[in-house]
Amino acid sequence: MQKHIYHFSYDDQDDALSSLAHYYDVDIDVLKFKFPQVMSYIQSLKDEHVYDKAVESGMLQTNIALLINPKFQEKEHSILRISFYHRCSTDGTATWFKDGLLNNVAGIQAYLEKVITLIPEINPLIDQNKIIRVSKEKAMHEEKVELDGINGFYRYFDAQHIDNSGFNFPEIFMDMGIYETVKAQLASKLTPTIVKFFVDLEMSEVNYILEKYWYSVWLGDEVATTIGLNAGRGKTIPYHHIQQIYYLENVC
């Protein structure tokens, strides 16, 4: 049986609202008409310091659904297809991702191999075996598994923001204290890049996704955040799940 797909994408606020309208099975104009009520509801929960409790109980998601479409029912046999935005640095070609988006271990191995080919003089500055070991240890500490990632922002706005330019290069470089040592050489050859990709999730995760979208919409584009997810969960994101690649100015 073919499953119904609920698509969620956050290129900008209009894109997010279109995704939410599709989920609630209403026209975008209906959702925009109800939008001020939803924002007021979220603000009231914040003002009363009960927002987190409303999220955990599911009350937030239920009440928003009732505000937007009192007759709303999820379609049977459905899945979630969520777009994420991964910030990194590449040589500016799509072939950089020919093997897909990899987990923390395979990803850092592939990254180092490519970087050393492009910048041979960087090789003495990096201890590949130590980087891989520390990457596994970090994943075990944070996720209780050796393999995690790939990670992604929910919003393109956050992924491209200068406040998050530190993600141009692997976080493990910061963890190991070599970021400042290698940054200039990497920036001279690589281009800051955002990869938009999707993962499919079970409907049991919909409340979590809805809260992230509504909270992000409520925040607006005034402040950049690091709101995101361990989207790959240690598995490779296939190349054909990449939806778009954006190249940014080289600012780090």
Image (cartoon, helix red, strand yellow):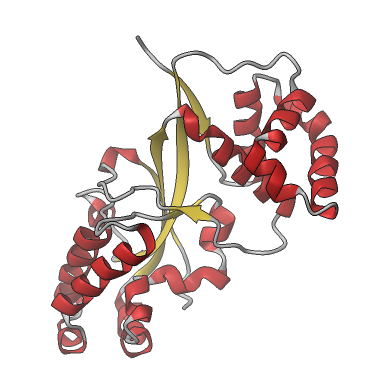
Q: How many marks?
A: 0
Q: Residue at x 46, y 47 (%)?
A: 84
In the image, taking residue 223 as reference, residue 239 lies left or right, namely: left
- Image quarter of residue 35: top right
Work out whether residue 73 or residue 165 is closer to the camera in this orientation and state it: 73
Q: Residue at x 20, y 80 (%)?
A: 119
Q: Is residue 30 visible?
A: no
The percent position of residue 243, horizontal first and vertical second, equals: 39, 41
Outermost residue toward the top in this view: 1
Q: Is residue 182 above or below residue 99?
A: below
The percent position of residue 218, horizontal first and vertical second, equals: 74, 49
In the image, taking residue 142 as reference, residue 99 lies left or right, namely: left
- Image quarter of residue 202: top left
Q: Is residue 109 visible?
A: yes
- Image quarter of residue 24: top right
In the image, taking residue 93 as reference, residue 27 lies left or right, namely: right
The percent position of residue 47, horizontal first and vertical second, equals: 85, 54
Q: Residue at x 25, y 74 (%)?
A: 134
Quarter of the image that includes the N terminus: top left
